[in-house]
Amino acid sequence: MSFPTDRPAVWFVTGTSRGLGLELVRQVLARGDRVAATTRSSERLLAALGDGIDPSRLLPLTVDLRDEAAVGRAVQETTERWGGLDVVVNNAGYGFLAAVEETGDREVRDMLDVQVVGVWNVLRAALPVLREQRGGHIVNVSSILGLTAVPGWALYCAGKFALEGLSEALAAEVADFGVGVTVVEPGYFRTDFLTEDSLALPAETTAHYPAIRAMVRDHLKLQGGQLGDPVKGAAAIVGRVLAGEGPLRLLLGSDAHSYASAKVEALRANVEAAAGTAPATDFPAA
Ligand SMILES: NC(=O)c1ccc[n+]([C@@H]2O[C@H](COP(=O)([O-])OP(=O)(O)OC[C@H]3O[C@@H](n4cnc5c(N)ncnc54)[C@H](OP(=O)(O)O)[C@@H]3O)[C@@H](O)[C@H]2O)c1
């Protein structure tokens, strides 16, 4: 893929008033690039960015990512303003901690609306632009929990596993158009993710999952002590993507690397154990 060398790159980033999204916006502006930054609150985004931002290179967009028409208008406003689109980062997301049976219908739909439907809305609007111009890169921020699952995180994992599946298929669909796809899989990063402002909890819990309640308490206490530095995380994404080196999966953090390695080993053992039994369900060869 080729990135513009004769003009600043144009970015479209979702979920930008806090955490990794905010840091991405800061870094792309510092490079001299242009960024359309979606958020539920442009006021919060502008306050977080502070003074000294060049308004000609920032397009703050208050968008409900679940609203297909609103997302379409946001992408159109971006391309009309800057004449193209180079990198799309689907970053918005939040955690939800509960046992499967404690997770309500509304909570499932809300999570998938943000992590799957919202991403799909962005992709449907942005892909025709990237395809026509025959270049660009899509970055979908997943999680190490999009590769491996742990108790109490089922809903979050369901959303991120879905995002991984869609990204893997998409990468193969758009490669011939010169469009790259990267799924980012961070471990624990020191953003607002584990604060009560971001993390969602179930409306009701039961007494049956004391280990999950303890896990929730431990995670709330982890805030401020996470291993991952969002400044380095954002720099890794920006650097790799603009260098044309965005891999399909970009693991961030040594914790993410350990979890991924354990998953691959378990999966390999599972696959090898099925080598003798899986073919038993085939029709006999004609
Ligand atoms: N930090 C970690 O440990 C970690 C680990 C693995 C993966 N991740 C992933 O990294 C991405 C960024 O998270 P972060 O760590 O930067 O957390 P964060 O500081 O809580 O920021 C999350 C961003 O996502 C947006 N967001 C949150 N809930 C939303 C909702 N219901 N609807 C729409 N947008 C929503 C927010 O955007 P606005 O408020 O501006 O709308 C916010 O800026 C997420 O996809 C997260 O799942 C984080």
Image: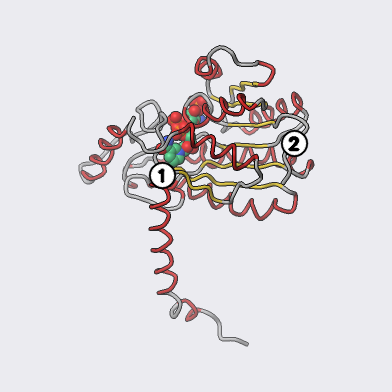
Nearer the observer, 152 or 217: 217
Disc 1: which residue: 155
Q: CA distance from mark 2 to mark 1?
A: 39 Å
Quadrant position of residue 105? top left
Q: Is residue 67 left or right of residue 103?
A: right
Query: Relative to residue 101, is residue 24 depicted above or below?
Result: above
* Residue lying at the far top of the rendered structure: 51
Which quadrant of the rendered structure holds the C terminus? Answer: bottom right
Mark 2 or 1, nearer chain start: 2
Colouring scheme, one of rainbow, by chain, secondary structure, one colour: secondary structure
Q: Quadrant of residue 203?
A: top left
Amino acid carrying mark 1 in the image: Leu
Residue 193 % position (x, y): 40, 32
Q: Secondary structure at mark 1?
A: helix
* Any part of residue 106 in sight: no
Q: Position of residue 181 (x, y in %)?
A: 62, 47
Q: Quadrant of residue 242?
A: top right
User: 68 or 39, which is in the foreground?
Assistant: 39
Q: Residue at x 41, y 36 (%)?
A: 189
Label number found at residue 165: none
| Residue 283 position within the rendered picture, expressed as x and y whole percent measured from the top left | 55, 82
Q: Residues within 10 Å of mark 2 (few under 14, many from 20)?
A: few
- In the image, taking residue 195 as reference, residue 94 lies left or right, namely right
Return the residue at label 2. 4
Secondary structure, mark 2, is loop
Amino acid found under the numbered disc labelled 2:
Pro
Kindly report which numbered mark, 2 or 1, lies closer to the viewer in this rendering: 2
Q: Where 232 sits versus 180, above or below?
A: above
The percent coordinates of residue 225 (x first, y second) are: 32, 33
Residue at x 67% of width, y 21% of height: 57
- Contact, CB < 8 Å: mark 2 with mark 1? no
Q: For the point 66% across and 45% down, which residue is it?
A: 244
